[in-house]
Image (cartoon, rainbow, N blue to C red):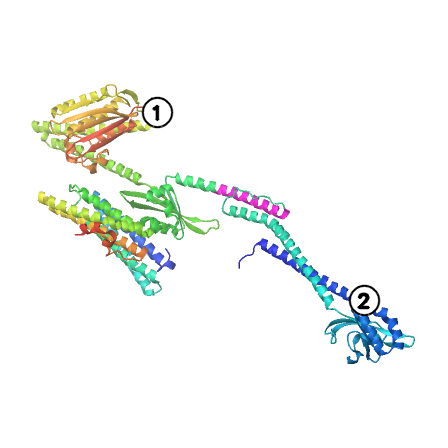
Amino acid sequence: MKDRTAHTPDFLKRKLLQLSALVEENARRCVLVIRSRDWQAARSVIELDDEIDELEISIEEDSVAMLQSGALGNTGTQFVVAVLKINADLERIGDLAANVARRVLSIGQHDQLVLPNELMELADRTLTMIAQSLDALVDMDPVLARNVCMLDEEVDALNRSMYELVRDRILSSPPQTERLIHLLSISRYLERMADYATNIAENVVYIAEGRIIRHRRNDQKGETRSDSDR
Amino acid sequence: MRKKRLFWQLYSSNFLIIFLALFAFTFLISSSFKSLFLDEVSEDLQSRAKLLHDDIVHRIGEQSNRAIDDFIVDLGRRSSTRITIILPDGTVIADSERDPHSMDNHRNRPEIRRAMKGDVGTSTRFSMTLQQNTMYAAIPLRDEGGILGVLRTAVPVHKIEENVERLQWQIVGGGLIITLLAGLMSLYISRRITRPIQELKQGARRFAEGKLDVRLPIPESEELSDLAEVMNSMAEQLQDRITIITQQHSEQTAVLSSMMEGVLAFDTEEQLININRSAARLLRIDPEKARGKSIQEVVRNVGLQRFVERALSSDYTVEGYITLVDDEEHHLQAHGSILKDGQGEIIGVLVVLNDITEIRALENVRRDFVANVSHELKTPITSIKGFVETLLDGAIHDKADALRFLGIVSNQADRLNAIIEDLLSLSRIEQGAEREEIALAYSEVRETLYSAIQSCQHDADQRRIAVHLDCPPDLHALNNPPLLEQAIVNLISNAIKYSEDGKSVWVTAQRINDDEIRIDIRDEGYGIEAEHLPRLFERFYRIDKARSRKMGGTGLGLAIVKHIAQAHHGHVDVQSKPGQGSTFSLYLRITAMEEEYARV
């Protein structure tokens, strides 16, 4: 990417996609780390997050410069604003992936630990949501983006059942408490990663259709949603 | 501007030419008719005057003006001609239409003047007397003495003009009919000229649409038939070239897609130009959707994105390693080199990807193996060395201690021996399989299984473990009995080792399809965690090192089983759940693979 194209929407989009690649990779790595509890792999997830943070700051600076230049039209401004939001969401996903890696380090390598199926399913769903929200971003596909928003409910449900599972296990075997708390945190981090993926998907709809769907979920999905919200 | 059709251009110009020609013709004809008529009338007037000449000259000498006038009136009525007689001084003495006394002096009328000079005078003009266009002809009246006066005859010309006009209309009418007929003919001719052009146009359009196999009809006219032939041969050449290009393209695609390596090409803007099947599979890309998009959109892997950037800015071939993360990690070796077109201009970059995940894994296995062998050998040797040194230091004098220590040394030496035996047999099997020296025969399996159980019977009895055999007597498979027995012994002794006292072990064998049998060794032991299962057959891989060593295992038993299975062109797998026991399954072939028949 050359300088002559700097500060154009296309350049900004490419940079954002670069960030999204980094973030998705790190999210995948952090899930692998949960399985392998490989100490070195966990460290490299935490290190890669620094790179994510740097790129995020650079994108933010470019966006602000573009907004200040005043050369953007109506849709251009809308695009840059959406980029700013997605940028922040991606950075948060990166942070959470690093948090997951830190928790894995706290659990330790040699501990015998059986991972609950719910957690691994939650991790898979979260990765799917991140991948699909980024696919939607690449293709500016509002249909796929809406699909991601639907998946969020499943992830929420899995996180709730993780909570119940951890609570029951703590009651039945108190010595495992610390380790179980770590698992619960990992589950919460993953669930929040999925939330940010949902935000990204919503912003994709915003760019593609110029509509804000963030606070209108009940309108979109009707009655099915309201029960699980309470 | 809208283009006019050739047909209309031809037709309208033809029509215009016809119309103009007819118009000019009509004009010429009618004007020459008119002058012809007028000439005739003028001649007629003159000859009438000449007929009267002698009679009038005679009367002028003898009769009074009055009598002459009466005669003229009568004459004029009968010949429907106006007749006037004028004296040389211009005085009118007789007129067939009017009273001569009321008339002007006519000396200055042009026809009169000419007649006075002795000529015949004619003139056509508006007559104030008759109030209409009139033609006059005047002749001098002369006797021997000279000119006595002038005799003038006149007729109105409006009749002539009417005639000419009627004639003109007839000509115009006829002209219009001719124009119409000529127009129709011109329409037909224009059609005939433009139709083949129209056909050529449609043919050329089909060429442009890529339908190069159709040929243009050859028109009759020379110019157009030349054109059609040139176009046909052009289409033929185009078709040939397109065929060649298509063929080259499909050859190229075939080469690219049958390559194991992933190949990607990007242009200087980092947009994907081409991707082969391997690369698409490796990077999980849909090639149809991805073409023409930027690398950031297509490949969500920063390592590859940066590699392409680096390759684009380098003059040399660059090399790099990229890690892809999906369900597991893939390690890729990447080579990137600049693409140049015929003029040496940089048009992009070519990236070749090699999946080295397996090579990496093999390297790791080999490195681990060397480390493991050294470690496994070092443990008993350290122990032997320690006890021998203790004996040398004086313990040899205490008989009880000495015997105990020597017993330990002997045990450790056995263990060392066992490890080396296993390593040797592992390498023998491996080499045998590699050089295809292991003889496989189509033989019964039951006997082999039975003798394997016999070998383990002693250990089983000590732990009160029952070993059950379930195998049809006529079950045959391609096998090498001593090797198969060794594999089964290893599996049964493992099953015994990792079961609690008093449990059972089952050995069952059955045919699973036309081509394969399966031998299961099932226990009710401790079971194995899922995460260990993929690595279980690696050399020296142990779930619990301390326990394994205490049991006297070398860490090579399952590796030997795996290699024996491979030497049989079969395979081995395991199913297990913690607390529920394990089942190891050995798959053997019944028929040899084709190329092996010769050897069997």
From the viewer's perspective, tell me whether residue B526 is left or right of residue B573: left
Q: Is residue A137 above or below residue B368?
A: below
- Nearer to the camera, B36 or A220: B36
Host chain of mark 2: B
Q: In this view, does B122 lie above or below B417?
A: below
Residue B494 x/y as whole percent: 18, 29
Q: Is the magenta stretch mostly helix, strand or loop?
A: helix
- Nearer to the camera, B315 or B484: B484
Q: In this view, does B548 lie above or below B161?
A: above
Tag of residue B596: 1
Camera-side mark, 1 or 2: 2
Residue where numbered disc 2 is placed: B44
Span colored in magenta:
B221-245
The picture quadrant where one finds residue B30 is: bottom right
Secondary element under disc 1, as helix, strand or loop, is helix
Residue B282 x/y as whole percent: 33, 42
At label 2, the amino acid type is Asp
At label 1, the amino acid type is Glu
The picture quadrant where one finds residue A112 is: top left
Instruction: Say yes or no: labels 1 and 2 on the same chain.
Output: yes
